[in-house]
Amino acid sequence: MVYLVPLFPLMGFLLNGIFRKSLSKSLVGIIGCGSILASFIVSAILFSQVMSNGVSAVQPLFQFINVHDFKIDFAFQADQLSSLFLLIITGVGFLIHVYSTSYMHDEADEHFARYFSYLNLFVFSMLLLVLGANYVIMFIGWEGVGLCSYLLIGYWFKNDSYNYAAKKAFIMNRIGDLGFLLGIFWLLSKLGTANYNDVFANVSHLSPTDITGITVLLFIGAMGKSAQIPLYTWLPDAMAGPTPVSALIHAATMVTAGIYMVARSNALYSLSAVAENLVAIVGIATALFSATIAIKQNDIKKVLAYSTVSQLGYMFLGLGVGAYTGSVFHVMTHAFFKALLFLGAGSVIHAIHNQQDIRYMGGLKKYLPITHITFLIGCVAIAGIPPFSGFFSKDEILAAAYAVNPIYWVLGVIGAGMTAFYMFRLYATTFLGEFRGTEEQKHHLHESPAAITIPLIILAVLAFAGGFVNVPAIFDGHENLHHFLSPVLTTEPSHELDHGTELTLMGISVLVAVVAGGFALMKYSKKPELSEPEGLGKVLANKWYIDELYDALIVNPLDSLALFFKNVIEKSGIDGFVNGVGTFIQYSSRRLRLVQNGRVGTYILFMIFSIIVLWLVFWNQTTITNFFQKIF
């Protein structure tokens, strides 16, 4: 049955894409949502089979590459890790599709169908990435989600700024993808295979240099796809697309691809201390850096975007310290509360006619009661306050970080405090206080329709209860997720802390989050920031001027070089030579045609000259010499 999981979204993409001009919106919605629902049902069946049997299966579909003794199968692998990701992708993806039927309803029929076809293709690509039984099939899905992000971020293609954001995402991901591709080539050159089972079974045939080189190159791919320093700046700009697209990118697809790839490759990463340290350092640096930027953003989607970058940093910190289960756990809980937050933000934007600046919101609590309470649940969950889901997954990562290096834990707690601060700043500025929009906006304020609020309610329940999947032993839990994933995440080290230490660490992180969140509530519910920031606040609002730095160091020099090649090399050089040849031929032809003047004497003269020339060319040199000797 495993092939059915990606097949349904692929069929939805083809039907809505090919017949987009003839299908009604209701039928487009049924096809788009129904294909993901069918995929979710099959994924649930596969998950139950894997959970009950405890085995993994590789299902070859056909031979993809066959060159002499080198073969790559187009094969799917259903095991504990892939089946869990299938549920996350199809479950959250289905809710986002349902939400989109209402959110995008004002689009023209043809564009509505185009949107759903892209959305289905996005889910198909992510499912292909997760299900692939080797790195080559993973890479096909990897590139597929990159393409779909380009199509969906630039969905409103008549807006040049949206097109620029789409190109930025596409190009920055290509930088990371080159590293990923080189890592795959390295693997193939050393082992002759890219199949997970074969690679992990033959790790002993790789030298330490090989392992470090391969894992670092694979991580470069993850840095691009999962938006880590320095390849993170595309993700906040990806907010140019429709809000449901933002939710899909940030919660269920694309940005989690890097986490999945590193977790899947745990047998390699566990053998390279250099790679693990690199992953951990980049992760915690990204978590802190992006959190500082989120503190001063006023675009509701930009705050959530930098929040995603920060949370991805926590996931990579977990991977770097060997807490693979904790990172996968945080992927799951993050999918719930981040999808909830983005869809909640979309409900707010929908209610106040596409306004995204939180300085012109406020007081929405009484106008959008369902959106308000679900958004609040999302804020509490991402802040890591018990018993909400974020608490369990975040603190599992922090505990593992403390066991490896207490400095990681300190930095992680600081980041958790900033997370609580900027999320409750966002909540207070948006929902509390007085409404600061226009009277016309206030007059039209109302709760979103059921197709929007029902997914919010379901995600709110998951954001609250999702953490109970892996309750730690300190709370008399059985760590169910850890035991379920143990056959795949076989190299996960034990980070056992005594219960007293673990409780202390949890208490400190929760206290920091509560204090930071409470301070933000008191500060911004009464006096939101309405003026432009100054000093350090201006630096943070302008994202540390990293985009400007990239423009100065990379973009502008490349543009100047491209302009040089265009004007000097291409136009003056290549085009100048080609056009010069053409101009010369035209000029010489115009001159040559003048000899055709119709005069017999001229023709006889040319005939004589021609005879002389031919005679000089074809007569041998000795004859010519004798001829001139006789004359002179």
Image: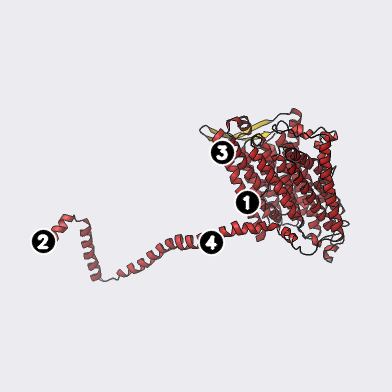
Q: Earlier in the sequence, mark 4 or mark 3?
A: 3
Left or right: 126, with 626 as reference point: right
Give the residue type that dot 2 points to: Lys
Residue 169 in percent (x, y) is at 65, 52
Looking at marks 4 and 1 on the same chain, the residue that comes earlier in the sequence is marked by 1
Earlier along the polypeptide chain: callout 3 or callout 1?
Answer: 1
Residue 172 marker: 1
The residue located at (73%, 50%) in the rendering is 288
Which residue is the site of mark 4?
A: 563
Q: Nearer the viewer, mark 3 or mark 2?
A: 3
Looking at marks 4 and 2 on the same chain, the residue that comes earlier in the sequence is marked by: 4
What's the CA distance linking mark 3 and mark 2?
A: 80 Å
Mark 2 falls on what kind of element? helix
Q: Which mark is residue 630?
A: 2
- The reply to whether dot 3 and dot 2 touch (C-beta < 8 Å) is no
In the picture of the structure, the residue carrying the numbered disc 3 is 186
Query: Horizontal and vertical percent for residue 105?
Result: 76, 55
Task: Identify whether 495 is placed above or below 542.
Answer: above
